[in-house]
Amino acid sequence: MIFVTLGTQDKPFPRLIKLVEEQIEKGNIKEEVVVQAGHTHFESTKMKILGMIPMEEYQKYMNDCDLLITHGGVGSIFDAMKLGKKIIATPRLKKYNEHVNDHQKELLSSFSKEGYLLVYNEGDSFEEILKKSKTFKFKKYKSNNNKMIELITNFIEEN
């Protein structure tokens, strides 16, 4: 099962759901897809679309998924990393009114450089990243608060 989570942002993010639906239509995604859409309104007969869901339900989908496709929310990413999930993350962009700034781009770049996830950036081939996720060796999360604090501190200081 693939779990797509858009978080609880009050800004819609249909761009990511459209990418996933295109891959279902092309036959590149054959698994069940469950979407926690939050404030994003999207109709589909190819995916199970949920709005806001209780934390217990979110945790169940997170535990059950083989792949998480997510926005650049740190909470969703850490939840998946702690469970050893494969992660494809896409930053919300200011120019589409998906967020107030583009901080998710830099944050995801840092996580990607460390090998924790794959990033889809505008202009990339989502299909190729999806294929890469099947063989990519995702770095295992090891609780190391000092390293994570350093990673986040460096990110903040550089911006």
Image (cartoon, rainbow, N blue to C red):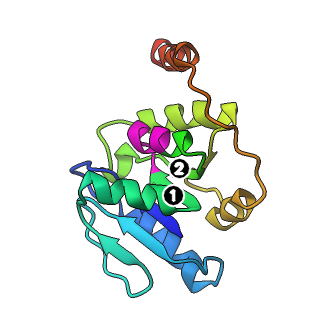
Return the residue at label 1: 69
Q: Is residue 5 visible?
A: no
Vertical comparison of 17 with 140: above or below:
below
Q: Is residue 85 visible?
A: yes
Residue 40: x and y, percent? 27, 63
The local crowd at label 1, few if under 14, some if 14 to 19, many if 20 or more residues have their Cα within 10 Å, is: many
Asked if residue 73 lies in the magenta stretch, the reply is yes
Question: Left of 2 or right of it: where is 57?
Answer: left
Q: Are marks 1 and 2 in contact (CB under 8 Å)?
A: yes
Vertical comparison of 41 with 67: above or below:
below
What residue do we see at 28% from left, 51% from top?
55
Residue 99: x and y, percent? 31, 43
What residue do we see at 55% from left, 54% from top?
122
Return the residue at label 2: 89
What residue do we see at 37% from left, 48% from top?
95
**Residue 108: which numbered mark, if any?**
none
- Where disc 1 sits, the SS reads strand
Q: Amino acid at mark 2?
A: Ala
The numbered mark, 1 or 2, whose residue comes first in the sequence reads: 1
Asked which quadrant contains residue 124, the reply is: bottom right
Asked which quadrant contains residue 131, the reply is: bottom right
Question: Left of 37 or right of it: where is 66?
Answer: right
Residue 150: x and y, percent? 54, 13
What residue do we see at 30% from left, 55% from top?
56
Q: Nearer the viewer, residue 37 or 158?
A: 37
Is the stretch drawn in magenta largely helix, strand or loop? helix
Vertical comparison of 118 with 41: above or below:
above
Alpha-carbon span between mark 1 and mark 2: 6 Å
The local crowd at label 2, few if under 14, some if 14 to 19, many if 20 or more residues have their Cα within 10 Å, is: many
Residue 12: x and y, percent? 28, 58
The magenta region covers 71-79
**Furthest-bottom residue in this view:** 45
